[in-house]
Image (spheres, rainbow, N blue to C red):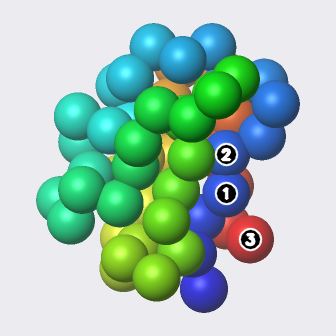
């Protein structure tokens, strides 16, 4: 099960920098996680400064 980024995302990029499989990319209004690539490690959620990432 992949993680999901909510609308609380401030597009800081901290999550993308921590993703070991490069599953996170900048979207139109926020960063987005590719569920087909995500390995559900939680590194992104742990580094998000606004708590915008959670398990789906």
Residue drawn at point x = 17 percent, y = 59 percent: 20
Q: Position of residue 24 (x, y in %)?
A: 40, 49
Residue under circle 2? 5
Q: Residues within 10 Å of mark 1 (few under 14, many from 20)?
A: some
- Residue 29 is marked as none
Quarter holding the C terminus is bottom right
Residue drawn at point x = 64 percent, y = 28 percent: 28
Q: Are marks 1 and 3 in contact (CB under 8 Å)?
A: yes
Give the left or right position of residue 21, taking residue 1 as reference. left
| Rendered position, 16 above or below 34 | above
- Residue 4 is marked as 1
Query: In this view, which residue lies farthest toward the front?
Result: 28
| Number of dots carrying numbers | 3
User: Which residue is nearer to you in this view: 51 or 14?
Assistant: 14
Residue drawn at point x = 63 percent, y = 14 percent: 10
Which badge, 1 or 3, comes first in the chain's sequence?
A: 1
Q: Are marks 2 and 1 in contact (CB under 8 Å)?
A: yes
Which badge, 3 or 2, comes first in the chain's sequence?
A: 2
Determine the image quadrant of residue 31. top right
Residue under circle 3? 56
Q: CA distance from mark 3 to mark 2?
A: 9 Å
């Amino acid at each position: 099960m992949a993680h999901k980024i909510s609308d609380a995302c401030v597009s800081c990029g901290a999550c993308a920098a921590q993703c070991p499989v490069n599953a996170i990319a900048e979207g139109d209004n926020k960063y987005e996680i590719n569920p087909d690539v995500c390995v559900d490690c939680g590194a992104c959620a742990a580094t998000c400064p606004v708590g915008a990432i959670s398990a789906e």
